Amino acid sequence: MNNRDIQAAWKYHDGTKHSYWSIRNNPHSLDWANRPRPFKIYPKLEPFPLPRDVPQTGVAALSAISEPVPSSRADSVPDLQDLARILYFSAGITKQRRSPGGEIYFRAAACTGALYEIELYVVTGDLAGLDAGVYHFTPADVSLRLLRKGDFRGNLAEATAREPAVAQAPATIICTGTYWRNAWKYQTRTYRHFGWDTGTLLANMLAVAAASGLPAEIVLGFVDAEVSRLLDLDTQREVSLCLVPIGRTSERSLPEPKEAPVLHLETVPLSQREVEYPAMLEMHDASSLESVEEVTQWRGKPPTLPSSGLAGEKVQLQRLPEEEQENDTIEQVILRRGSTRTFDRTASITLAQLSTILDCATRGLPADFLEPTPSRLNDLYLVVHSVQGLKPGAYFFGREQNTLELLKEGKFRTEAHHLGLEQDLPADACVDIFFLADLKRILEQYGNRGYRAVQLEAGAIGGRIYLAAYALHLGATGLTFFDDDVISFFSPHARDKSAIFLLAIGKPLKRKPQ
Ligand SMILES: Cc1cc2nc3c(=O)[nH]c(=O)nc-3n(C[C@H](O)[C@H](O)[C@H](O)COP(=O)(O)O)c2cc1C
């Protein structure tokens, strides 16, 4: 398969669209007796417990998500406490609830269906408190398990064609996706969810790294097979999705790549039986990079996608003044975040709150597939129901101008209910934010891997919106949608785009005391 053969991404995307009829005609039901385990467990490996009483950063959430770490020449090397903080606030268990289907362990970042199919691994040199090695992070007991002893950072540098952030990083975190854990519920859509759920987790990871004073960025350019081999993945079941180098060192001598023989480490089966969805394996293969040369070519900085021209009535966005912004720390906000289950339909938010959320969430994402200047693959389209200072209607967010352009005025709660898969949440929210992308141009520029990039970017911006909304004591939830109906709703402006992601913001309905 070839990354440039972009029919593969179109086939997957078109084949996994939701529509009114696809939902009704899908006979799939949840087999609770075969529900996958929420954790990857290596029964024969000893845990290396991570410290649990790590000092908080004290950095306000809104700054942590939107302000880059000042670049300094000095080394910034994480220690074990930094690593523990970053891993826990990205993928750790923050809440636990009993449900009819069993115990649910809610994690730091939102995840489709609370199925938590994204695993984290760390490839590190010697750090204060941790020996060099390749480790797996187990949220269940907040510990690392050593898969390979020794410094394998040279293998990552090689696999990324010496991407400078990876080559200079004292440690790199790798996100992987486990198909079955999510496909048990969502079947073939899981490959889209890989991007969304990695993205929300990355929003936390980048914010906590920044709050810890450590540079970090998203790296999507790597030879897939090399990284998967290093982590000893069974790639029929689990695949590497992205790398996040953490910190920077001026140390020049990176170790040479080492042999990484197959380990065949035993893991506890996720379910009695698993169903394989070949369309996802094909999509992954078709978006894999096969050689260092291909990585180098892929990474050649692509031209920024032109943003859609603005024509309609514009509203200037204006952030909350500094003194009115909440100063809760990033850790406090992550701990209280949760997806809103019911919005108060009678509530409204202010234009300044919405402006602050949009501004914080869309400040340049540090990623190897984006220009350093704030650029994006996704465009944001809004359905405004009740925002003080804005007429209800459909809008386009002009990032460069920091404006909302009115596309059509009107009360669209009924339409939002339909577009958001006939759920009440998008109808009752104050505003729904749809992510739409010019998939044609993206795939032409980046090949099939552009499909991974656009989904992941949406998840990461969506994850930042979650954090910014909770920082302001509002509520938010990710949602899914009827693909083509979303495009029709926002057309003609959105003609030729594809629906990628949806998130609603509002005020949670306060339950009346019983
Ligand atoms: C991309 C995305 C899409 C989601 N879609 C829906 C949805 O369609 N309906 C819904 O009720 N919740 C949806 N959720 C919310 C998840 O169910 C929720 O994140 C998960 O149960 C974990 O709970 P928490 O976010 O409160 O930690 C979505 C979450 C994400 C990240």
Image (tube, grey):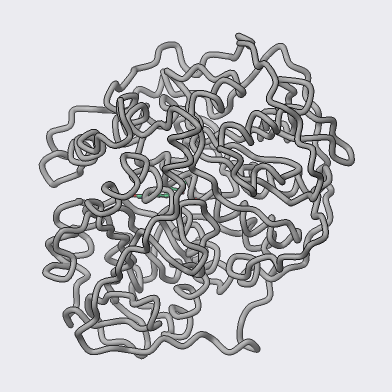
Residue 55 locus on image (x, y percent): 84, 56
Q: Is residue 76 above or below residue 181?
A: below
Residue 203 locus on image (x, y percent): 55, 55
Q: Is residue 110 above or below residue 121?
A: below
Horizontal side, residue 297 vs residue 363: left or right: left
Q: Residue at x 38, y 83 (%)?
A: 401
Q: Is residue 398 above or below residue 153?
A: below
Q: Residue at x 30, y 68 (%)?
A: 306
Is any part of residue 117 visible from this angle? no
Q: Residue at x 68, y 62 (%)?
A: 332
From the viewer's side, name the closer residue of 293 and 53: 293
Q: Residue at x 25, y 72 (%)?
A: 308
Residue 60 locus on image (x, y percent): 69, 71
Of the 4 image quadrants, the one containing the N terminus is: top left
Horizontal side, residue 119 vs residue 80: left or right: left
From the viewer's side, name the closer residue of 116 and 434: 434
Is any part of residue 458 visible from this angle? yes
Q: Is residue 87 above or below residue 391?
A: above
**Count of numbered tags:** 0
Residue 141 locus on image (x, y percent): 72, 31
From the viewer's side, name the closer residue of 474 and 71: 71
